[in-house]
Image (cartoon, rainbow, N blue to C red):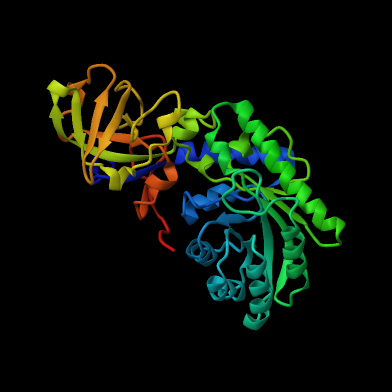
Amino acid sequence: MRLADLPTPALVLDRARLRRNVQAMTERYKKLGIRLRPHLKTAKSADVARMAVSGHFGGITVSTLKEAEHFAANGFRDILYAVCIAPSKLGQAAALVKSGATLTIVTDDLDAAKAIAARGAGLGVVFDVLIEVDCGEHRSGIPVDSDALMAIGGELHAGPGSRLAGIMVHAGHSYACRSLEAVAEIAEAERSAGVRAAERLRAAGLPAATVSMGSTPTALHGRNYDGITEVRCGVYMFGDLFQSEIGSCGKDDIAVSVLSSVIGQRRSENRVLIDAGFLALSKDRSTANTPHDVGFGRVADLSGGLGLGDVTVVGVHQEHGMVEGRTPLPFDRLPVGARVRVLPNHACITSAAYDRYHVIDGSDEIVAVWPRCNGW
């Protein structure tokens, strides 16, 4: 089967590009001697995960317990659930531990730490726990110098059902940077926050074996990782248009795309319609504030090449995408029924609409179909 044979819209994954992206990050962290713990919240696929951990040491990272269950069922045992846990989910987490998974959970709250410490014992497990520290994003995490850090650390260390594993930090605000110099500065702030928090715990006689940091921009463009024990990043595997705009990948590195069919022409408006709307592409407009706004996605030809010109999805309805060009569209190449591939603004959100990847490997032949894990 070939791409032209698929019903549309469909999610396409280029294995050759994925392999190249994965190998580059793997080699980077092998040379640095730091554990790479790939984040699978974008891919949500055991097949992708096997490529991401091939030839390197370290576990994986997830953003939902359903992902953790999916990967544990597929043989992955060392899993970090990198979202502050709600106490109501401790039973689900305990079941994973009892199944044989080495599951690490996260908190930034003293009451939650007390619940983890007490309920772990009641559930018959000992939870490994990282404390999340804020390094400037102000989403979650506690200040490095706060009394709460020591209180939470003490509670987790002393509790019968918990084990203090160390520190986690995440520089999500690196995505707002518009230069690699700015990314490098945030990477250093992220590193420094994690290391200082761990040093505070250790100075008080508390363990902090793990210092975990990471986002794709800071994983790629940081200059110094002294004191960091592991790096979490995920979107590097697929890349997307936003990552391309901030310099974390090239457009030829983008491994995921949405196959769509042309369903209408509006020559007087220099426009064609495709059957991929906001449900297929998402409403993400992350490139809107970058030098090159690509609307709701960049339109490539069936081969994935950009030979159609500077053509973008400028508007979306539920099942319609409106495609325009900065110059006259090549309408003879875009008749009704023609197939195109839309490169996504944000691979995580676009991929979330689908339950499988149609895998190619540098050509238009479908070589595999890989399932995805969705939901919570």
Q: Can residue 301 be seen in this view?
A: no
Residue plotted at (48% across, 28% down): 245
Is residue 244 shown left or right of residue 87?
left
Q: Is residue 361 visible?
A: yes
Disc count in the image? 0
Q: Is residue 202 above or below residue 10?
A: below
Residue plotted at (64% across, 74% down): 115
The image quarter containing residue 117 is: bottom right
Viewport quadrant of the C terminus: bottom left
Q: In this view, does 53 lie above or below 224?
A: below
- Spot the residue most to the front: 147
The image quarter containing residue 262 is: top left
Viewport quadrant of the N terminus: top left
- Residue 159: x percent and y percent? 74, 74
Q: In this view, does 252 lie above or below 235?
A: above
Q: Nearer the viewer, residue 322 or 261?
A: 322
- Residue 204: x percent and y percent? 85, 60
- Residue 235: x percent and y percent? 51, 43
Q: In this view, does 69 lie above or below 57?
A: below
Q: Which of 274 and 49 is in front in this view?
A: 274
Is residue 237 shown left or right of residue 210?
left
The image quarter containing residue 98 is: bottom right
Is residue 119 shown left or right of residue 282?
right
- Residue 336: x percent and y percent? 14, 33
